[in-house]
């Protein structure tokens, strides 16, 4: 009988250990996933701000919001797709364009730089790029596409833990292994609303994906594909507001030179 009791106690300890590993292990996995999600969110915010700064720069090169709006509308794109918070500082241009024989040509080149910077920042934010990590492995950098997939996968993980590894079930099973305690309490852990209260308190909250504020931006056509249009647009702006364009170019030159120092 003593051997049987020893075996029973050993099996009970093993089952409890397995349940604890399952319950706490699953919760630790979700906690780790949520911590990683938060870290990725912060990195993605930095990339989003780079897009905003590039939008602000191109808006400046377009001589303000009205010109920025005209550019996208006449290019067949929605201006609202490139909204950015008011007061965002412009991205820094770190290189001057090649020499141009005319002011109009120089403006076109500066515009091309601004357009390319926006295209690159959108690509990096939306889709990321392949880079080597500290171990030399090729990995894709943080991006919006993967971020939302990650949110969906974490939600699946959360719903599984909330459904299959509930705190009340663990409590019920633990108490059921002590018949004497069950007889004294007349309950096996918790009943009805009491169970729900425990499970609700211990449950993870799913990520509300629709409330995540990471706007989508359209992929911009390669500048070579837009060359004719950009040239025509800049020519119109140059003809209409030559003085302001010249002042803009001088300002861009000064700022670019500062970055190169």
Image (tube, rainbow, N blue to C red):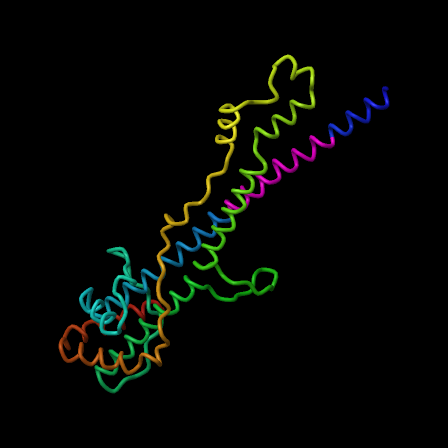
| Prevailing SS of the magenta stretch | helix
Q: Is residue 142 left or right of residue 73?
A: right
Q: Is residue 231 magenta?
A: no
Q: Is residue 15 above or below residue 64?
A: above
Answer with the quarter of the image where residue 118 lies. Answer: bottom left
Q: Is residue 30 magenta?
A: yes
Q: Position of residue 12 (x, y in %)?
A: 74, 28
Q: Position of residue 60 (x, y in %)?
A: 23, 67
For the C terminus, the quadrant is bottom left
**Chain part drawn in magenta:** 14-35
Name the residue located 55 percent from the left edge and 38 percent from the top edge. 163
Front residue (pair 74, 43): 74
Front residue (pair 126, 153): 153
Name the residue located 65 percent from the left edge and 22 percent from the top edge. 175
Q: Residue furthest bottom?
A: 101
Q: Is residue 131 left or right of residue 170?
A: left
Q: Is residue 83 above or below residue 75?
A: above
**Marker count (numbered):** 0
Q: Residue furthest top?
A: 184
Q: Position of residue 64 (x, y in %)?
A: 19, 66
Q: Position of residue 91 (x, y in %)?
A: 32, 64
Front residue (pair 248, 66): 66
Q: Is residue 55 left or right of residue 207?
A: left
Name the residue located 69 percent from the left edge and 20 percent from the top edge. 178
């Amino acid at each position: 009988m003593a051997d049987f009791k020893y075996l029973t106690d050993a099996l009970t300890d093993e089952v409890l250990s397995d349940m604890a590993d399952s319950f706490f292990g699953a919760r630790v996995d979700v906690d780790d996933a949520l911590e990683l999600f938060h870290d990725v969110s912060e990195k993605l915010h930095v990339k989003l701000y780079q897009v905003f700064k590039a939008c602000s720069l191109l808006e400046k090169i377009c001589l303000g919001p009205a010109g920025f709006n005209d550019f996208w509308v006449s290019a067949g794109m929605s201006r609202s797709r490139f909204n950015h918070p008011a007061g965002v500082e412009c991205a820094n241009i770190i290189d001057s364009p090649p020499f141009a024989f005319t002011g109009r040509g120089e403006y076109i080149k500066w515009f091309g730089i601004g357009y390319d910077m926006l295209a690159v920042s959108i690509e990096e934010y939306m889709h990321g790029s392949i880079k080597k990590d500290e171990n030399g492995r090729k990995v894709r950098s943080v991006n919006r596409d993967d971020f939302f997939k990650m949110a969906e996968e974490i939600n699946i993980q959360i719903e599984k833990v909330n459904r299959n590894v509930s705190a009340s079930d663990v409590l019920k099973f633990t108490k059921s292994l002590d018949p004497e305690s069950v007889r004294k309490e007349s309950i096996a852990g918790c009943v009805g609303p009491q169970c729900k209260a425990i499970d609700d308190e211990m449950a993870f909250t799913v990520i509300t994906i629709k409330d995540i504020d990471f706007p989508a931006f359209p992929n911009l056509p390669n500048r070579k594909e837009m060359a004719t249009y950009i040239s025509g647009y800049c020519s119109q702006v140059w003809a209409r507001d030559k003085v302001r364009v010249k002042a803009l170019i001088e300002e861009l030159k000064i700022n670019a030179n500062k970055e190169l120092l």
